[in-house]
Image: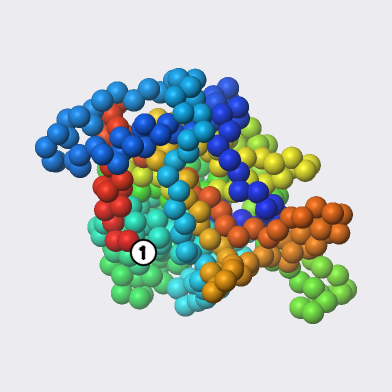
Amino acid sequence: MSSSHLTHPTSDTGTDDATTAVGGEATVPVPRWLIDALDTTPRRGTAGAADAAAPVPTDPTTMVDVARADEPPLSVWVTAQTSPAAQRKGRYVPDSTAHPAKMLPAVAAHAIRHYTRPGDLVFDPMAGSGTTLVEAIDAGRRAVGVEYEPHWVAVARANLELARDRGHKPDGEIVQGDARQLPQLLHERYRGQVALVVTSPPYGPATHGQVVTAATDSPDGKVHKYHHRYGNALDRGNLANVGHHRLLAGFTRILTGCAALLRPGGHVAITVRPWREHSELIDLPSQIIACGRAAGLIPVERCVALLARVADTDLVARGSFFQRDFIRKQREQGLPLHLVAHEDVVVLIKPLAPGALPTTSADRGRGERA
């Protein structure tokens, strides 16, 4: 399992659809009145802060009736001005490149600087090669992560050691285990202490990995994938190897564990992208929002993290070989698809108290803005 920088061949960004369901629970947009309340509620510790305890309806059908078309606030993160390789150069061990679905370091770094302060604790329940952890301690935060596959635990530890060699002193820890068992994996001292969770669901066979072609040492002149699979494909305990509905159920359980680790007002930032399955769009971002609701978290933002460089007049896409090949074939068939230029970042918050409104938009941005 891993924090994922994906390469799914789709041009769709996904929409909040009140008819989408996960485990019987509707995926519902955040009502506009709630967003307005977040922007006007006094900050913690100021006069009138008691008003923040006003109850928030949690019945999905009620929320749909209030504002069916509203969505969480949107912002664009300019996170791909340099290539992924350039972002990692000299900061990660070479073995990191073999991970099939690495999170873009700039995405993790932006979330960490925006939602936390120096010294805060950052957590990734599916840490992969340790991108979230490295970016956290590089920014002067503490970090802890959980990773299912022992090989990537070793790589993450090597990346943490490399960060320490650069002179960074904050604590960084990686634990091997199944993130669905967080209460048994992590020490009690972490409970209620995490300021920010940064993670992404695994995508199993949908990742593209790397390729060799006739121009890059292919032994037979054909295109071959490599580093495109998580661990042992027969391991059904790995969420990367299970079906879509089991993935959502498992991710809900992980978010429930994360909610117990978060301090009141703590955030969860999840990078996620829709994909096509048999030509049908799977709106995974909206489904992940439903998973967060089921775990007791409140959606507050749905952001765009760019995977393309911003040029003077347009975006310069950084598509993989298989993305470009897929788009070319689809256009030959008359389908006007485009290369993926971004992924969604769903941001959720743990309420200050049961039934209370989350912190204000000003308080949500209390970190070092990137």
Residue that sits furthest to the left in the current view: 47
Residue to which mark 1 is pinned: 370
- On screen, residue 212 versus residue 183, left or right, reads right
Q: Looking at the image, which residue is at 59% across and 67% down?
A: 315
In this view, the residue in front, 250 or 118, is: 118
- On screen, residue 142 versus residue 50, left or right, reads right
Q: Looking at the image, which residue is at 87% across and 54% down?
A: 333
Residue 288, position as x, y percentages in the image = 53, 38
- On screen, residue 108 versus residue 190, left or right, reads right
Disc 1 element? loop
Image quarter in which the C terminus is found: bottom left
Specify whether residue 143 is in view: no
- Residue 322 to residue 165: above or below: above
The amino acid sitting under disc 1 is: Ala
Q: Looking at the image, which residue is at 70% across and 41% down?
A: 281
Residue 272, position as x, y percentages in the image = 55, 48
Residue 357 figure quarter: top left
Residue 36 figure quarter: top left
Specify whether residue 74 is in view: yes
Residue 63, position as x, y percentages in the image = 45, 24
